[in-house]
């Protein structure tokens, strides 16, 4: 019996000893876990490293963007107005011409001959008219003396009036002959740039022929850019256009991203029911001829340039309750602040509600931030210093390597 009691006591002592050791182990693991969390970005109590920015008041333009097509303000298809042989081509394809410059010459000899014939017919008709008029005057006196009957006088008068009509017809024929001679020299009706030509010297050109196009001239400066905007912008556009001319910027495709500046000059009187868009046109000086007919370009219409509160777009955070930012208070703690964003422009967000000018906000490192906990604002230029120290490289070596990389950048 005594041995059984001793065994039970021994088992009890061992159980109490193992329980005390287990409790001691749990107490040791708890500080280690909290220490590890503190080393991970401040959620266990340390300050979270962040980059900070300020709420600023800037002039941010209110714009509508679209894709437009470049169109010439004026374009003309040059055709021959007389039928004849093309004697001379006075221009080259793609040449800039001025109004009145000679483009083509058609053999004028047949038309000069027709002109001379018309001049001869007119002189003959004028001579006959002069003779008839003199007879009318002579027979008028004889009729008064009753030496000539009234019927003879009326017949002579009718002949004179008929000759007057012939003179008018011959004058018209002469004017047409002169015009045909002028049409033999085809001149530019406007200033612009010539396009492709499908005729050659010696070709027979005809009037009113389907394929009788000689050349097309497009006006390049000034020039139009046509584009469409959704119909929901109609009211806003009309309201701002009533206050003055709206500026339009166009960025043509290519390596040079400098925009061309123009003015909105046309708004269509109807909305396209098939697309739900409103057609607009803006005119540009195009002095450097960067805009070319048929080209597509990015269009921006500036409606207004208000001064508004802005924050960097990188500071915005989105949750189920909406958008918010982290505001750094005076005691260096973070506050989660709900905001209302009106619109975005480039790298900035326009704030309609929730912030005031001059407040400091977190623009990078939001994942480490806990509302109400302290934050540590880092200098963007100095963030690479600790990383270089951890990797065993000196600061001077890091700067030298960075400089070499900048020199190698294109």
Image (cartoon, grey):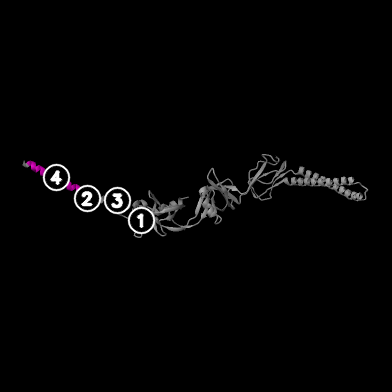
Q: Is residue 161 left or right of residue 14?
A: right
Residues in magenta? Answer: 3-29
Looking at the image, tell me whether mark 2 or mark 3 is earlier in sequence order: 2
CA gap, disc 2 and disc 3: 17 Å
Identify residue for label 2: 27
Nearer mark to the viewer, of 1 and 4: 1
Identify residue for label 3: 37
Identify residue for label 1: 335
Q: Is residue 60 left or right of residue 155?
A: left
Q: Secondary structure at mark 2?
A: helix
Q: Residues within 10 Å of mark 3 (few under 14, many from 20)?
A: some
Q: Secondary structure at mark 4?
A: helix
Q: Quadrant of the N terminus?
A: top left
Nearer mark to the viewer, of 1 and 2: 1
Identify residue for label 4: 14
CA gap, disc 1 and disc 4: 53 Å
Looking at the image, tell me whether mark 1 or mark 4 is earlier in sequence order: 4
Q: Nearer the viewer, residue 308 or 48?
A: 308
Q: Is residue 25 magenta?
A: yes
Q: Residues within 10 Å of mark 4 (few under 14, many from 20)?
A: few
Q: Residues within 10 Å of mark 1 (few under 14, many from 20)?
A: some
């Amino acid at each position: 019996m005594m041995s059984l009691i001793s065994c039970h006591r021994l088992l009890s002592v061992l159980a109490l000893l193992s329980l005390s050791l287990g409790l001691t182990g749990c107490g040791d693991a708890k500080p280690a876990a909290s220490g590890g969390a503190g080393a991970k970005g401040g959620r266990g109590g340390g300050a979270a490293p962040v980059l900070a920015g300020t709420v600023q008041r800037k002039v941010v333009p209110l714009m509508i963007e679209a894709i437009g097509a470049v169109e010439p303000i004026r374009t003309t298809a040059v055709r021959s107005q007389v039928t004849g042989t093309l004697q001379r081509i006075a221009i080259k394809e793609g040449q800039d011409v001025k109004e009145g410059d000679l483009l083509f010459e058609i053999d004028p000899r047949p038309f000069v001959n027709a002109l001379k014939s018309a001049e001869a017919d007119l002189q003959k008709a004028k001579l006959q008219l002069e003779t008839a008029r003199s007879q009318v005057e002579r027979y008028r006196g004889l009729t008064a003396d009753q030496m000539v009957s009234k019927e003879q006088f009326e017949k002579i008068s009718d002949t004179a009036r008929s000759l007057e009509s012939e003179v008018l017809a011959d004058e018209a024929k002469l004017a047409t002959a002169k015009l045909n001679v002028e049409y033999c020299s085809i001149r530019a009706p406007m200033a612009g740039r010539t396009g492709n030509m499908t005729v050659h010297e010696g070709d027979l050109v005809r009037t009113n022929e389907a394929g009788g196009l000689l050349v097309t001239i497009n006006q390049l400066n000034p020039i139009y850019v046509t584009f469409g905007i959704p119909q929901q912008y109609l009211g806003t556009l009309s309201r701002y256009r009533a206050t003055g001319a709206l500026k339009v910027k166009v960025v043509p495709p290519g390596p040079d991203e400098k925009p061309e500046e123009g003015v909105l000059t046309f708004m269509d009187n109807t909305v396209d029911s098939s697309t739900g868009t409103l057609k607009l046109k803006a005119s540009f000086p195009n002095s450097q001829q960067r805009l070319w007919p048929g080209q597509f370009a990015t269009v921006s219409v500036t409606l207004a340039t208000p001064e508004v509160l802005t924050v960097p777009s990188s500071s915005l955070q989105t949750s189920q309750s909406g958008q918010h930012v982290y505001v750094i208070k005076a005691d260096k703690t973070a506050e989660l602040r709900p905001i209302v964003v009106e619109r975005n422009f480039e790298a900035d967000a326009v704030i309609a509600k929730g912030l005031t000018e001059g407040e400091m906000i977190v623009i990078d490192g939001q994942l480490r931030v806990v509302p109400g906990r302290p934050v540590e604002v880092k200098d963007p230029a100095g963030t690479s210093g600790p990383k270089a120290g951890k990797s065993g490289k000196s600061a001077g070596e890091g700067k030298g390597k960075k400089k070499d990389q900048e020199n190698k950048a294109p």
